[in-house]
Amino acid sequence: MADDDLDDDMEDDDEFEEEGGGSGGSKKKMLLLAIPLVLILGGAAGAYFTCLLDPLMGSEETVEGEENAGPELGPDGEPLQVAFTDLPEILVNLNTTGRKSSFLKIRVSLELANSLDVPQVEAVQDRVVDAFQVYLRELRVEDLKGSAGMYRLREELLARVNDAVAPVKVNDVLFKEMLVQ
């Protein structure tokens, strides 16, 4: 009985090839060529529209309002150097639900785009420390665990310091010391 089913399947395959004539094989070849071609063209178009091909094509056009990426120049025509300024040590009580208190001791340094901005940042340093303390007091110990916690903390502090010192631009918040106890 199994042999009869096998014979019927073979006859069906023969009928399919006879109905299609000789064009069944050529249609398969066309599909085997067309599908990869469409995928390659689609990938190239996607790369072009997302500007991934710009470095390869050598198009280094600037957007309107954007200056060349050269170094900023000071009043004397010399290029400005990146500058760092330290904030005072901050010690805060972390938000806990139990009886045990947890503390965070942190020392950070701010990376500024140029050395001319240091006096402006030092003038509003108290505002920066206040913004940091308000945020840090709401953190839990779990928020600071792992590299993801450190990354989120860095991003939040960077956003807060840029709000506090605007229009000066702070490039990065660097952790000099961080102790959770």
Image: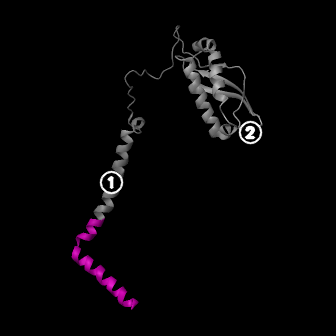
**Residue at the spot x=69%, y=33% of the render?**
95
Q: Amino acid at mark 1?
A: Leu
- Percent across and percent down for residue 90 are 71, 24
**Label 1 residue SS:** helix
Viewport quadrant of the N terminus: bottom left
Task: Give the side of residue 98 with respect to residue 155, left or right.
Answer: right
Residue in the foreground of this view, choosing between 136 and 68: 136
Q: Magenta residues?
A: 1-28
- In this view of the protein, which residue sits in the foreground, 5 or 67? 5
Residue 171: name its quadrant. Answer: top right
- The image's mark for residue 98 is 2
Relative to 156, residue 41 above or below: below
Disc 2 to disc 1, C-alpha distance: 63 Å
Q: Magenta segment: does it hold 5?
A: yes
Q: Is residue 21 visible?
A: no
Q: Quadrant of the C terminus?
A: top right
Residue at the spot of label 1: 37
Which amino acid is tagged 2?
Answer: Gly
Q: How many marks?
A: 2
> Which labelled disc corresponds to residue 72?
none
Q: Are marks 2 and 1 in contact (CB under 8 Å)?
A: no
